[in-house]
Image (cartoon, rainbow, N blue to C red):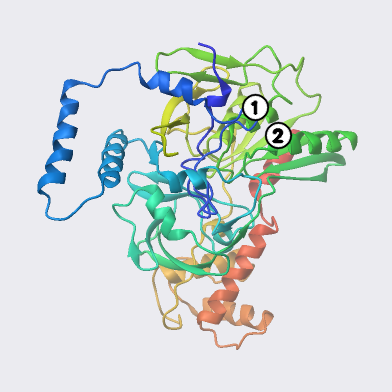
Amino acid sequence: MKLRKQHIFLIFAAALVLGFAGAFLGVKLAQPDPDQGEPADSVDTLEQNQYTPPADMQKVAQTYNLIKEHYLEDVEDQQLIQGAIQGMVASLEDPYSSYMDVESMTQFNETIESSFEGIGAEVSMVNGKVTIVSPIKDSPAEDAGLRPNDQILSVDGESVAGLNLNEAVEKIRGEKGSEVVVEIQRSGVSDPFEVTIVRDDIPVETVYSETKTIDGKKTGVIEITSFAENTAEHFTQQLASLEDENIEGLVIDVRGNPGGVLSAVEGVLENFIPNDIPYVQIENQNGETEKSFSELDEKKPYPISVLINEGSASASEILAVAMKEVGYHVVGTDSFGKGTVQQAVPIGDDGSRVKLTFFKWLSPEGTWIHEEGVKPTVEVEQPEYYFTNPVQVEEPVTYNETGENVANLQVMLSGLGYDPGRTDGYFSHKTEAAIDNFQTDHDLDVTGEVDEQTAGAIETAVVDRIRNGEDDRQMEKALDALYE
């Protein structure tokens, strides 16, 4: 089988930049190979016509006629047709396959290179739950403390149970400056909590680079936040600039990167994977594989580490596992686990399409990481306060109270350098003293109690500390691993 790249694009987990949906809520669902354009309609139609519908398909026509003739209310033909298609696709129980009507396709065709509005989070349907894959760097979702594997239960007080991913995303997206309240269920937290997020323009830059000096050695760090149309070009340019500065090691950071277009990650890997091993393999339903190779003669002369976490999905995993299998360090925690490739096929002549899983992708050695993720060669967890939750304050939290909310506050205070004495959820006198000290340092009323203002200040301090890279154990280990 000769793989036609114009047929292939990765769906970022399901790719909704809540500000995604479909791809970016701003939103998009997926992005075709930008160098090759959209799939050819004639080829797609030919492929669809290879199978004759079974005799039982007459049941669909009979049901249509039954509804049109006898249902109590009038029903538009298009509603019934779309419902039938959606039902077939839903029966696959594949979170990455869906029917996209004209409106969804309009979103689908928005270019990744333009700005979009939304909250900035990648979302997928996991076990029937709308689930955050990863918030986007510097987005409102990240600022609000959303994180991978958070489940969205409701939007502005309306449950999303029973909705498909596109329908849920439609509730979340909206204009810049508008507010949306999402109800979150977080693993390890008993009660759901609400987060109010102000929608904004979502950043579109995908590659950031800098140099650090580690043990006297100049080291490059490149962060890739998603794989968009121009990511490979920008990555290669910034890598060349770092090499011109004579870096002696490199860290590639794809933590929280939900994926993107296949050609982008291919372009990045072509800088690192020698031509004697494929950097990715694509397998069709018949088990036939197409292997992709670079033109590179040998590996880079300097050591490289790749950083991943549970928010690294799809194209990020293609990068991570390929680098791992050619001998580079992969540092962090297990990645998301999406090993399939989707194709959007036109159906009818109204611009709608069915997005369907056509292929699985395999590592250079033929490993399928789907639902398993990429396991790092060096496993490193972040500090506990990186995983704290927004503080829920209806009444001030005070001395002698107990519970998860108190334990959450204590972990935050400890991470910020204020010793609460314990982190078991009992509000002790030492916890009260820690809050006094925090309030004094942040020009707040010194009460020893946690009201909304103090809770907000603690949350902001934690977010700022994380975003500034303080206590980033994973980055520290990735840098250290280069020169061990």
Q: Position of residue 275 (x, y in %)?
A: 70, 14
User: In the shown orientation, is residue 189 left or right of residue 262?
Assistant: left
Q: Is residue 425 visible?
A: no
Q: Earlier in the sequence, mark 1 or mark 2?
A: 2
Q: Position of residue 138 (x, y in %)?
A: 64, 57
Q: Residue at x 48, y 66 (%)?
A: 408
* Separation of marks 1 and 2 at Cα, in angstroms: 8 Å
Residues at badges 1 and 2 in contact (C-beta under 8 Å)?
yes
Q: Residue at x 65, y 29 (%)?
A: 35
Look at label 2 and name its amino acid.
Ala
The residue indicated by pointer 2 is 232
Quadrant for the C terminus in the image: top right
The residue indicated by pointer 1 is 266
* Above-or-below relation of 398 to 246: below
Label 2 CA crowd tier, 10 Å (few <14, some 14–19, many 20+): many
Look at label 1 and name its amino acid.
Glu
User: Observer-nearest residue: 134 or 63?
Assistant: 63
Q: Is residue 355 visible?
A: yes
